[in-house]
């Protein structure tokens, strides 16, 4: 369930790649043990983008220490969402000093384009001079950086927005659950509705659009065959009126397609 950017990053690294089962710490330890004497970087999502669950970072950190590995967290969906001040997954677990690299995007909570990588100065210096994706790309436009800077100011100065985000998340999770939908293992504002059949998922997305609601349809190969889902995600700026409309649309379409019943 890793984001495609992690897969592409692994390929661009020319490193030997070993995959472990989704958030399965026993399987991660098996791989680390098999490669005990080699240099290792554990690359994980902070928040998994399709189903909204969170990496078991405390156990990842413990295993990294045990087997002398480094950690990189792709926190595209954690920045501005998790942690007391919105600093992401590492802050959420109180492990900011234990993660070697944190990568984030500007295109989610920071409302711009581009991204960042944060770590020790000497590591960032190395990346600046050896990462082809950085060297052979243009600098971000000033307007993009200004938007990111303003978004960070808002996150820091208006913590009530994070509180509202989680209030909206709880409302939608409980609302969709009470309607009878099967939800994925989410712990975040990404709430997936499990549909199963690819064609059914496309039908549901079209019916939702007719009700004025946009949601992402996710079908194979982005998810395993037979596990298609409708991916919804929520913002602090959604009002109760917005969310009630979404719940009403899901109830109507769910009943029309036989996904929920009275």
Image (cartoon, helix red, strand yellow):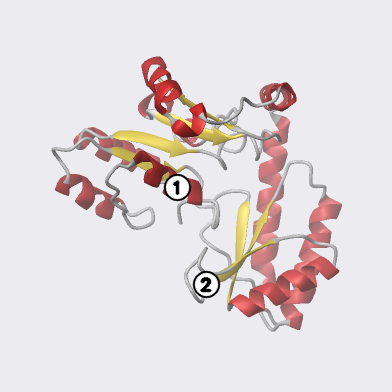
Q: Residues within 10 Å of mark 2 (few under 14, many from 20)?
A: some
Task: Tell me: residue 116, above or below residue 54.
Answer: above
Residue 79 appears in the figure: yes
Q: Quadrant of the C terminus?
A: bottom right
Q: Would you say 29 lies left or right of 132 here?
A: left
Residue placed farthest to the top in the image? 121
229 vs 144, nearest the viewer: 144
Task: Tell me: residue 124, above or below residue 110.
Answer: above
Nearest-to-viewer mark from 1 and 2: 1
Tell me the residue at 47%/25% (across/down). Answer: 118
Per the model, the C-alpha gap separating discs 1 and 2 is 23 Å
Q: Would you say 227 lies left or right of 109 here?
A: left
Q: Would you say 85 lies left or right of 165 here?
A: left
Q: Which residue is mark 1?
A: 8
Tell me the residue at 66%/23% (across/down). Answer: 156
Residue 142 placement: quadrant: top right
Task: Tell me: residue 84, above or below residue 2.
Answer: above
Residue 56 appears in the figure: no
Residue 66 location (% of width, % of height):
20, 36
117 vs 171, nearest the viewer: 117
N-terminal label among 1 and 2: 1
Residue 26 location (% of width, % of height):
25, 53
Residue 80 location (% of width, % of height):
62, 34
Q: Which residue is mark 2?
A: 227
Tell me the residue at 70%/54% (across/down). Answer: 171
Tell me the residue at 30%/48% (across/down). Answer: 17
Task: Tell me: residue 191, above or below residue 114.
Answer: below
Residue 53 location (% of width, % of height):
50, 52
Residue 158 placement: quadrant: top right
């Amino acid at each position: 369930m890793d984001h495609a950017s992690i897969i592409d990053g692994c390929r661009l690294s020319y490193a030997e790649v070993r995959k472990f089962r989704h958030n399965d710490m026993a399987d991660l330890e098996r791989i680390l043990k098999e490669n005990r004497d080699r240099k290792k970087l554990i690359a994980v999502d902070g928040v998994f983008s399709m189903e909204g669950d969170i990496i078991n970072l405390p156990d990842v950190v413990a295993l990294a220490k045990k087997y002398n590995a480094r950690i990189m967290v792709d926190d595209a969906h954690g920045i501005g969402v998790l942690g007391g001040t919105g600093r992401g997954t590492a802050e959420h677990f109180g492990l900011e000093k234990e993660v070697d690299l944190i990568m984030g995007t500007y295109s989610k909570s920071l409302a711009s384009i581009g991204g960042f990588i944060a770590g020790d100065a000497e590591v960032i210096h190395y990346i600046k001079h050896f990462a082809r994706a950085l060297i052979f790309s243009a600098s971000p436009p000033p307007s993009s950086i200004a938007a990111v800077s303003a978004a960070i100011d808002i996150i820091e100065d208006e913590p009530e927005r994070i509180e509202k985000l989680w209030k909206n998340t709880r409302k939608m999770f409980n609302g969709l659950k009470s309607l009878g939908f099967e939800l994925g293992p989410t712990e975040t504002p990404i709430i997936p509705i499990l549909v199963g059949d690819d064609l059914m998922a496309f039908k549901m997305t079209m019916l939702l659009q007719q009700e004025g609601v946009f949601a992402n349809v996710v079908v194979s190969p982005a998810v395993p065959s037979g596990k298609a889902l409708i991916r919804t995600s929520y913002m602090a700026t959604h009002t109760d009126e917005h969310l009630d409309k979404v719940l009403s649309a899901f109830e109507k379409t769910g009943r029309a397609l036989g996904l929920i019943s009275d």
